[in-house]
Image: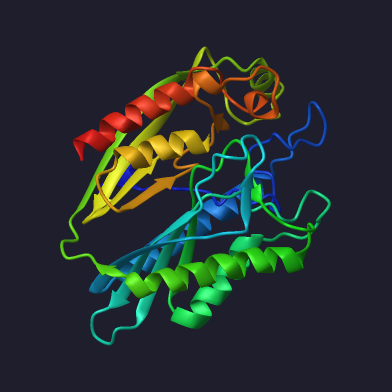
Amino acid sequence: MPANHIIVTSTHNHSGPDVIGLWHIDQVTSGVDFAYLDTVKARMVRAGLAALQARESASLFLSRNEVPGISYNARDEGILDTEAVTLRAERVEDGQTIGILVNFACHPEVLTKQNKRVTSDFAHYAYGRLEEKLGGVVVYVNGALGGMVTPLVTANSFREAARCGHTLADSVVSGMRGEQLVLEGRLRSIREPLALAMDNSGFRTLAEAGVIHRQFSDSIRTEVGALSIGSLLIATVPGEALPSIGFALKSAMKSNYRMVFGLANDELGCLIPSSDWRENEYEETMSLGKTAGDVVLRETLRLIEDL
């Protein structure tokens, strides 16, 4: 696979160091630790090379299941994707699990800003439960979590983070009872660069002050993508798409196994359909502007058609 088709995503947990700058120390001082960023990038490369060197023949299996009781949409209560879709790789020689990719949409923010410990939130507990039960290495990739898909909890505690993570893991395991073998594992990937209008004056001001370490002009360059692995279809979007965008993308995929990768190769904040734009709401203040969601949806749908 060409290097420009590598997908870098973020779980978007809220209990890690600031890598953007939005959670600044003050109005003129960024919270980004560039030494930490260098460490993250170096370890990403090291992990990728190790995985490449350890590659082996595998059978791929797909499954899906609903995950009740751990998420809700704080913006639009009735619009929520509770489906977890899973890709599992099994070693040909002995049938042991090599790795599992879980795609589910929810901010890992059980633990709020009052928590001062670095943690991957509920994802940590999902990793542990799945690796204990099935073996291998587990990767959690977030979906269309914008708008605000957040944990449904009774308290912002590690106990509730564990409950959410274990519920997700147990639902994934239950769904694997109906696993489908990928009979034809050909990989196809399409990427498309695009420009989005930059209409958020707040982002621009913070960038000019050096708080956000990214320069903005009238537009910003980013990308969308689509890929297929046998009967698995995946759309990648450069930020936090509202669930309505996620549903629209999944509806265009002609398969029972559909994933949306959020925060994929970029983080441009909330991606909101113009038909749902609400001036001065929180999500709108965290968006490039009114047209970004529509452009991302339109261009990603076009790539899905080309798969």
The mark total stands at: 0
Q: Residue furthest top?
A: 218
Q: Residue at x 28, y 87 (%)?
A: 94
Residue 32 left/right relative to 287: right
Instruction: Check the picture and name the quadrant holding the C terminus.
Output: top left
210 vs 242, nearest the viewer: 242
Please indicate, yes or no, whether residue 54 appears anywhere in the rendered image: no
Q: Say left or right for 98 vs 146.
A: left
Image coordinates of residue 22 in percent, x first then y, are: 70, 34
Q: Is residue 69 visible?
A: yes
Q: Relative to the observer, which residue lies in front, 267 or 24?
A: 267
Question: Which residue is located at x 45 percent, y 42 percent?
Answer: 264
Q: Looking at the picture, does residue 26 appear above or below residue 129?
A: above
Measuring from the top left, give residue 250's x and y in whole percent.
36, 42
Q: Nearer the viewer, residue 171 or 100?
A: 171
109 sits left or right of 190 in the view: right
Describe the colour scheme in one phrase: rainbow
Compared across the picture, whether 205 is left or right of 180 comes to: right
